Image (cartoon, grey):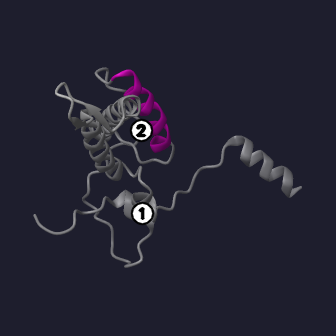
Amino acid sequence: MKGRKPIPSKIHQLRGLPGKRPLNALEPKPPEGMPPCPPHLDKLAKEEWARAGAILDEIGLMTGLDMAVLAGYCQCYSEWARATTEVQKLGLVYKRADGTPGLNPYLRVSRESYDRMLKAAVLLGLSPSSRAGLKINKKPSKDEAEEFLRQRK
């Protein structure tokens, strides 16, 4: 199928419907909620899972079906971070065995994992451009509600 990929109804709701077109009533609606972290992720990927997943879950953008996309994002984040650390240690260019300069191979790993990470981030709403039009109605916490009522007295 050519053309633009369809935008999920949840994203349309968060952005608003300027064209006033009806939402797709037949679109599957998986239950919202954070799936468990896959055990195969490394330590840094699991930390990113907890950080990014908590934010996505809080704003209602996470479902069990998104587990693989978030896991891929987190693993790419981990690969990018580790490769970038190696580039910083070794530099962009190194001396080969024959004495000629060569591009640090970790630089390629860093670039490729960053590209894959960004693609997954866009799918999840983790990039500035993918969430620019979202309008999230955050539920006030109990403390915020109590503070509001105190100010009204």
Which residue shows up at 51% across the image and 43% down it? Answer: 58
Residue 131 in magenta? Answer: no
Q: Give the range drawn in magenta.
A: 42-57
Q: What residue type is labelled 2?
A: Gly
Q: Where is residue 101 in the image (x, y as percent from the top left)?
A: 24, 36
Residue 137, by quadrant, is bottom right
Which part of the image, by quadrant, shows the N terminus? bottom left
Residue 135's place in the image compared with 127, above or below, is below
Type of secondary structure dominating the magenta stretch: helix
Q: Where is residue 31 in the image (x, y as percent from the top left)?
A: 36, 42
Q: Where is residue 147 in the image (x, y as percent from the top left)?
A: 79, 48
For label 2, the SS is loop
Residue 16, by quadrant, is bottom left
For label 1, the SS is helix
Name the mark on residue 93. Answer: none
Which part of the image, by quadrant, shows the C terminus? bottom right
Residue 47 in magenta? Answer: yes
Is residue 21 rendered to the left or right of residue 138?
left
Q: Where is residue 125 in the image (x, y as percent from the top left)?
A: 39, 52
Mark closer to the chain start, 2 or 1: 1
Name the mark on residue 33. Answer: 2
Q: Which amino acid does label 1 sit on?
A: Gln
Label 2: how many Cα within 10 Å (few below 14, some 14–19, many 20+): some
Q: Which residue is more in the foreground, 46 or 139?
A: 46
Q: Which residue is more in the foreground, 121 or 25?
A: 121
Label 1: how many Cα within 10 Å (few below 14, some 14–19, many 20+): few
Residue 85, by quadrant, is top left
Q: Name the residue under label 1.
A: 13
Q: Which residue is more in the foreground, 81 or 28?
A: 81
